[in-house]
């Protein structure tokens, strides 16, 4: 049986790594996320090369409930619904609370929290019909602890932890699990690009940016890789993980042990 996986925000970073890992299991893959048309075509072709299933991209903007509904309806039309739903799309904005732009607050809550409500509510009825489903929410160490100047991100990530638990309880007898993954600092293209910029603006070396700024709170002093997060997602999506539900798995190099 070919499973179908929907991964939001999968044109880059962690989402793309999860899409690649699920593709290698032979699943149909629904990619989502922004990018130039040629970039999206390249990514779609690459993922298609990893699976015997079908690979599609849907451009739904995760701030727009009607576009999310359209994506989830397409998944029902084409594949009878998602078997695996990975809510990964996420954005960040850093500012002190009294200066935090209202439109940034709204955008972060929409993408990092509300979009998962919209995908999950549409994904559950077909999952219930099949008696099998996996919902994986990419939260963050910031779903468990806070950092200053990240009010919207921390609030949204704490929110997704609560949503995960509630959904897990509601579908516990239907063969569906819901869990969060809480990564620490992951080396994505976005993070990589920040290293030389921060070194320049702070007047320190790139090594200092990595060790004294980025990995200050990550005891292993190593970035997590996107492949490591994808490997955990693959496990949570497996039959072996049937009894893991309503919880989170941290992959944060010891960050939240402190
Ligand atoms: P990224 O910027 O590389 O990828 C984000 C993806 O989301 C892209 O595909 C982008 O196009 C998509 N996206 C953004 N806004 C969107 C919107 N409105 N609609 C649809 N798609 C949208 O980021 P990443 O680092 O891979 O992060 C992925 C997830 O992992 C996020 O939820 C992030 O909060 C979480 N996370 C990242 C880290 C890290 O250190 N990189 C750590 C913990 C958690």
Image (tube, rainbow, N blue to C red):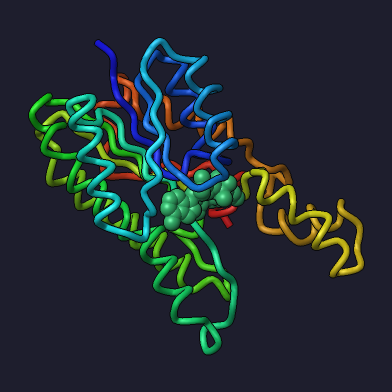
In-front residue for pair 226/38: 38
Q: Name the residue rendered at 49%, 63% in the picture.
A: 145
Q: Is residue 95 visible?
A: yes
Q: Is residue 139 visible?
A: no
Outermost residue on the bottom side: it is 98
Q: Name the residue rendered at 16%, 46% in the picture.
A: 169
Quarter of the picture containing the N terminus is: top left
Outermost residue on the front side: it is 37
66 relative position to 109: left or right: left
Quarter of the picture containing the C terminus is: bottom right
Q: Name the residue rendered at 52%, 89% in the picture.
A: 98
Question: In which quadrant of the rendered view does residue 211 lie?
Answer: bottom right
Image coordinates of residue 247 in percent, x first then y, are 32, 44
Image coordinates of residue 227 in percent, x first then y, are 58, 30
Looking at the image, is 77 positioned above or below residue 217? above
Question: In which quadrant of the rendered view does residue 55 lie?
Answer: top left
Image coordinates of residue 44 in percent, x first then y, are 50, 28
């Amino acid at each position: 049986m070919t499973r179908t996986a929907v991964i939001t925000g999968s044109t880059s970073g962690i989402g793309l790594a999860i899409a690649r890992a699920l593709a290698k299991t032979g699943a149909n893959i629904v990619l989502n996320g922004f990018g130039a048309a040629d970039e999206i075509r390249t990514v779609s072709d690459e993922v298609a090369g990893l699976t015997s299933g079908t690979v599609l991209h849907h451009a739904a903007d995760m701030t727009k409930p009607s576009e999310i509904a359209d994506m989830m309806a397409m998944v029902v039309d084409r594949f009878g619904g998602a078997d695996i739903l990975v809510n990964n799309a996420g954005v960040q904005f850093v500012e002190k609370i009294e200066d935090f732009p209202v439109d940034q607050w709204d955008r972060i809550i929409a993408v990092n929290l509300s979009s998962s409500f919209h995908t999950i509510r549409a994904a559950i009825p077909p999952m219930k019909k099949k008696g099998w489903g996996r919902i994986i929410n990419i939260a963050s160490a910031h779903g468990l602890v806070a950092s200053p100047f990240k009010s919207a991100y921390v609030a949204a990530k704490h929110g997704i932890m609560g949503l995960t638990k509630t959904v897990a309880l509601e579908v516990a007898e239907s063969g569906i699990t819901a869990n969060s993954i809480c990564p620490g600092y992951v080396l994505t293209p976005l993070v990589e690009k920040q290293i030389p910029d921060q070194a320049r603006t702070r007047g320190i070396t790139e090594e200092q940016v990595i060790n004294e700024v980025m990995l200050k709170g990550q005891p292993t002093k190593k970035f997590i890789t996107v492949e490591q997060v994808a490997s955990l997602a693959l496990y949570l999506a497996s039959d072996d993980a049937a009894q893991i539900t309503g919880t989170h798995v941290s992959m944060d190099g010891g960050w939240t042990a402190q």
